[in-house]
Image: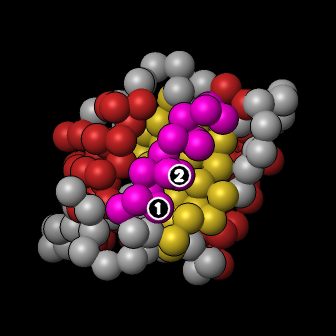
Amino acid sequence: MQVPRTVRIAIASDHAAFALKAELAVALAEWGHAVIDLGPFSDARVDYPDFGYALAQAVASGEAERGVALCGSGIGISIAVNRNPACRAALVSDPYSATLAREHNDANVIAMGARLIGPDQARACLSAFLAGPFAGGRHVARVAKLSHPTL
């Protein structure tokens, strides 16, 4: 299942998730999306915050509409992405949590851990994330507080 229109999607990882990043970038392109690969471009050791910050900037600036953040556990890179108030990165491990991330939290970045999730499950999560709409309604005020806690 894919989004019915082409979406610009930035993808970034650390060295531990380099192979998964490559697989998901191929899947995204096959699904018809424009992929912005922010690296790394080898499996040489790198620091996940650098790539999380770059992904967050791409989403916050509008260069990308959505983001895919990957590291060994998914935890560190999701923390880095969420430092940007324009980003709502959700760490997911199954398609249902990916659906809820979009539906309830209007997540614009999906984060996954390459050491915790296999490529088939990662593709299923990504597909659910991209297909899921934001429900709006009662969730709008809550989502607004994620970027502006004083609301």
Asked whether residue 24 is drawn in magenta, I would say yes
Residue pictured at 44% horizontal, 69% vertical = 33
Q: Is residue 62 above or below residue 40?
A: below
Which residue is at the far front? 30
Q: Quadrant of the N terminus?
A: bottom left
Read off the magenta span: 17-31
On residue 25, the disc is 2
Where is residue 77? Give x, y as percent: 63, 40
Camera-nearest residue between 88 and 2: 2
2 and 1 marks in contact (CB < 8 Å)? yes
Residue pictured at 42% horizontal, 51% vertical = 27
Q: Is residue 98 above or below residue 106?
A: above
Q: Is residue 98 above or below residue 9?
A: above
- Left or right: residue 79 versus residue 66 is right
Camera-nearest residue between 93 and 29: 29
Where is residue 78? Give x, y as percent: 57, 42
On residue 29, the disc is 1
From the image, give the main secondary structure of the stretch colored magenta.
helix
